[in-house]
Image (spheres, rainbow, N blue to C red):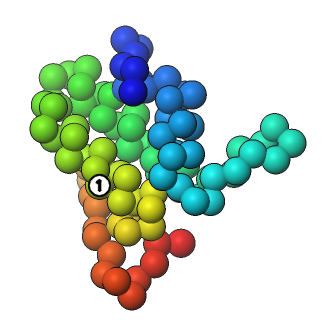
Amino acid sequence: MSMSCTNRMLHKQDIMDFIKRYDDSYKIKENIYYAKRAFKTNSVINYLGKLKEVGGLDYEEAEQIFGLLIKYLKGEADVTWDNGKVMFKLLSEGEHNE
């Protein structure tokens, strides 16, 4: 994934490619993109970009968050926000992230 020098961690196309790779709901129909987990994924990536800008993100932490984000895109985790911080909840075998 290529990094951007702007306030975003990834370019929009990189974000869409990332989502497409892991989210089975991703599709394009008549120039409209459908991906049920795109909004939260984009918000987490933008959050990481802001942390990176202020020096509050190291490589290991970013790698861990991207790993959890992949689990979210696969429906294996959920993403929530708590007081401005991103939180992940791993889902059990019987739970599904819709």
Identity of the residue drawn at 55% across and 28% down: 12
Identity of the residue drawn at 13% across and 38% down: 60
Q: Residue lying farthest front?
A: 21
In the rendered image, the quadrant that contains the N terminus is top left
Query: Total of numbered circles in the picture?
Result: 1
Quadrant in which residue 78 is drawn: bottom left
Front residue of 46/71: it is 71
Q: Residue lying farthest top?
A: 5
Q: Residue lying farthest right?
A: 30
Judged left or right of residue 71, residue 35 is right
Q: Position of residue 96 (x, y in %)?
A: 45, 78
Identity of the residue drawn at 28% across and 68% down: 89
Q: Position of residue 77 (x, y in %)?
A: 35, 66
Mark 1 secondary-structure assignment: helix
Q: Residues within 10 Å of mark 1 (few under 14, many from 20)?
A: many
Judged left or right of residue 17, residue 10 is left
Instruction: Please tell me whether residue 59 is drawn above or below residue 44 in the rendered image.
Output: above
Q: Position of residue 24 (x, y in %)?
A: 58, 59
Q: Position of residue 87 (x, y in %)?
A: 27, 58
Circle 1 residue: 68
Front residue of 43/10: it is 10
Q: Residue lying farthest bottom?
A: 94
Residue 21 seen in the figure: yes
Identity of the residue drawn at 35% across and 51% down: 69
Q: Amino acid at mark 1?
A: Leu
Instruction: Please tell me whether residue 39 is drawn above or below residue 15 in the rendered image.
Output: below
Instruction: Please tell me whether residue 18 is drawn above or below residue 74 in the rendered image.
Output: above
